[in-house]
Image (tube, rainbow, N blue to C red):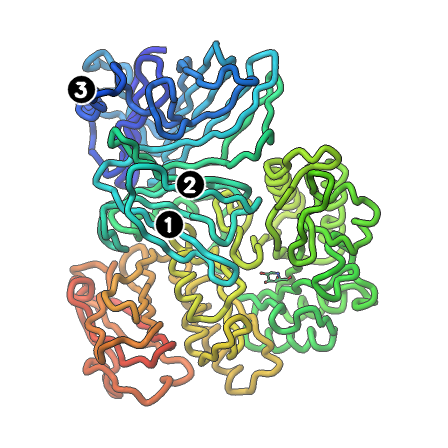
Amino acid sequence: MPDQRILLRAEDTSVLIDLTAGRLPAIVHWGSELGELTAADAAGLAAATMPSPHANGTDQVSRLAVLPEHHTGWTGRPGLSGSRRGVGWSPKFTTTGLTISGERHEGPESVEGPAAGGVPLATYGVASVETAAVDELSQLGLTIRIELLSGGVVRMQATVINNGADDYQLDDLVLALPVPAQAREILDFAGRWGKERTPQRQPLGVGTHLREGRHGRTGADAATVLHLGTPGFGFADGEVWAVHTGWSGNHTHYAERVYTGEQVIGGGELLLPGELILKPEQSYTSPWIYAGHGIGLDAVARRFHRYLRSRPQHVDADRPVTLNVWEAVYFDHSLPKLIELAERAAEVGVERYVLDDGWFGGRRNDQAGLGDWTVSTDVWPNGLHPLVDKVKELGMQFGLWFEPEMINLDSEVARAHPEWVMATGDRLPVEARHQQVINLGIPECYAYVKDAISRLLDTYAIDYIKWDHNRDLIDAGTQPGGVPGVHDQTLATYRLIDELKAEHSGLEIESCSSGGARVDLGILQRTDRVWVSDCIDPLDRQQMSRWTTQLIPPELMGSHIASERSHTTGRRHDLSFRAATALWGHLGIEWDITGANDDQRAELKAWLDFFKAERGLLLRGDLVRIDHPDPALMGHGVVAADRSRALYSLAMVDRSEVNGIGLVRLPGLDPDRRYRVSPVIIGGWPQTRFLPSWWSADRPYVDLTGAALARVGIQPPDLPVEHAVILRVDPLD
Ligand code: DGJ
């Protein structure tokens, strides 16, 4: 194939791809916008950035491809690992074909035009670049797709095909992007049940920072987004490169710095031993690896948000306020109680009512019934009709909980089909929440689960599924041989969701997994919301929402107002803090409001009214998170795309060591415009506190320019700990 370079440019991101000497595509530059380039500029940049030979290294050096190849002398993680029983384990691919689709830019020199060094340059905006390659010796074909998406997100995917006559065992496939030496600090996430997405930082040394997810689901402790940035990067500053593996099964994220000084970030699916043996002509396609670059974490997050919002299937900002009954009733399904809850919900303005776990088979607690997807006649003698009819009559949508990938051994389906339980090694996996995994990779089992769910969707007017997944996949093999089945299970789950959605137009699906253990862009290609965590304590949610938005925009985050006393932490919080925290996502209620008094219900209604009035901004604005030196204050906001308005939240999440924590800067507005900043008071101000000088009873506002707000800031009110204030910023001209 003739040599070629391709420049992709969109939304302040430039990607220069080198396709020379028949090698796999390599990235010359991924990062800040470089402006228009000629072929000569691109050739110069390629020459200037080419790795140098070094003492005791290989005599020839080559630029690292997005699928790093060992044969080039690369001693970091290879892009492809596998063999034919020990043969063909170090492929040397030759690129044979190139297809580009997207917005062509007539740059100073087009692909057909004269080119410096004989290498032409083609310039595109949002586009997809697909290369085909082969290696005759290992008898493999390889397709690599590199795309620049709306928002400036880059994504990559590879397909490997077995062109040989015997089996090829694929052990690992990762794709990686180069990151310059300036980036030496890692930020990614840890987490556990009830405390998902806790940030962790560390320096990148020589070696591999490897995050493996072996839960068979995304995992509460998933890396989620792995960033590499200039030391000390914050929400607004420091240069950051980030990667996310869009996959809901076993997966990796990694950052690697090798002895040559080269460094990459990447990821892929994590394959179990022998999980993928490609028969002749069979192929494997990797998950998409998403990447974003920006100055500060907000810029990176905004890329992901803009990309997700640009998709045709993305939810609109009119997200219906939801009530989920789980923490109100748990497994105690009494129709009068559930109807009273629906009535109270409608009164305060709820728009969607979701019946959680416990409505089917023998599911009276968490030890039985999973897999028996028929309405329990013991608890629901007339089916779900009386409740669904009531909910609809009250003008709300109806949602229903399922856990389609799971099975209790104490169920009709497990008794009839014990072979559908995922297992390996002639034993059953260790139980988790008293349950096992049902094998959707078995066609008959898949058909059974799909038919059961479809029947319910056809019988009742179900607008929404809360799709749960409450255990790790341990020893998850296919009986009787027990070959690993996580890859197939993940694909089967995706297919099941895709088919159910295709056959039931308008159906929305929430991805829940013991709370927030399935938050990734693989599941979010086909679902409409994630449940962030089973912990709804607003103090913890301040932190979890802050970091969940590093990948997904607020409208995809289920964010509920819980009862006064948190069921997870036992802490008590005023309604103002619970509501002011929950507002910044897809708002809901998870609280037995039949026990709430009139004042509480009136205040709740006022918060819901505020959300409804502002959801266009809350769920479509640009997210900004405030870098404040005092960790006792956590602040964030949303700014309208035209910079005309904004809302901010300032929350005290701890007691500061000083009385006055200092000025708080409100970033993101038009520096040249004048605005009025005023507090949003719902349900009264929490306690008698000192107010800042700019906020008096007869003048509860201050007028400032966007520049002053962002660069100087304002004195925050003297908030009690575990309280928040919402500030609205409206234009004066
Ligand atoms: C875990 C979820 O996160 C909860 O919200 C609830 O749906 C339970 N499962 C039900 O079993």
Give the residue type at disc 3.
Answer: Ala
Mark 2 Cα-neighbour bin, 10 Å: few <14, some 14–19, many ≥20: many
Disc 3 vs disc 1: which is toward the camera? 1
Q: Amino acid at mark 1?
A: Asp
From the viewer's perspective, tell me whether residue 114 is left or right of residue 591: left
The x, y position of residue 442, in whole percent, is 72, 37
- The local crowd at label 1, few if under 14, some if 14 to 19, many if 20 or more residues have their Cα within 10 Å, is many
Q: CA distance from mark 3 to mark 1?
A: 38 Å
Q: Residue at x 59, y 36 (%)?
A: 487
Q: Nearer the viewer, residue 448 or 50?
A: 50
Q: Residue shown at 55%/49% (left/top)? A: 527
Q: How far apart are the alpha carbons under marks 1 and 2?
A: 9 Å
Query: Percent from the top left, x then y, of residue 179?
Result: 28, 36
Residue 644, position as x, y percentages in the image: 27, 61
Hey, what amino acid is under mark 2?
His
Q: Is residue 156 above or below residue 518?
A: above
Residue 253: image tag: 2
Instruction: Tell me which label, 3 or 1, sits earlier in the chain.
Output: 3
Say which element carries label 3. Answer: helix
- Decide: marks 3, 1 in contact (CB < 8 A)? no
Kindly identify which residue carries mark 3: 40
Foreground tag (3 vs 2) = 2
